[in-house]
Image (cartoon, helix red, strand yellow):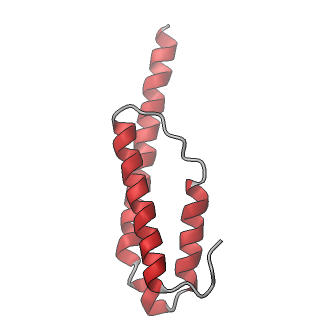
Amino acid sequence: MTNKAEDAATVAKRLKSIVDYVRDCQMRVGKGEIMDLQGLDKNVIDICDAIGRLPEKEGQALESQMSQLIDSLESLARMLKEQQEKFDITAEAR
């Protein structure tokens, strides 16, 4: 759980860590690995809450990183869907 007094630098560091993790997942899914993303949703919700508790200017300063996170999550979701469709087609062919 996030401390209400968490400063912008700490929130930015956590946000970068989540973005990096999602990008790593994208790379691994692209290689055909199966990923367990349990807990990612909670981490994303927690970071959004932490940003929401920041003063407006400090939160706005993280807008670019949040956009990167959103783009990465959307890309990961597409990749996972494509991977699932490939598994479904393979399973149907058997």
**Observer-nearest residue: 14 or 70?**
14
Q: Residue furthest top?
A: 94
Q: Position of residue 17 (x, y in %)?
A: 43, 64
Q: Residue furthest right?
A: 1
For the question of whether residue 80 can be seen, the reply is yes
Q: Residue at x 44, y 55 (%)?
A: 73
For the question of whether residue 59 can be seen, the reply is no
Q: Quadrant of the N terminus?
A: bottom right
Q: Residue at x 59, y 75 (%)?
A: 49
**Observer-nearest residue: 9 or 67?**
9
- Residue 29 to residue 6: above or below: above
Q: Residue at x 45, y 39 (%)?
A: 80
Q: Residue at x 34, y 37 (%)?
A: 30
Q: Position of residue 18 (x, y in %)?
A: 45, 62
- Residue 63 to residue 34: above or below: below
Q: Position of residue 54 (x, y in %)?
A: 53, 87
- Residue 17 to residue 84: above or below: below
Judged left or right of residue 45, residue 64 is left
**Observer-nearest residue: 15 or 10?**
10
**Observer-nearest residue: 19 or 64?**
19
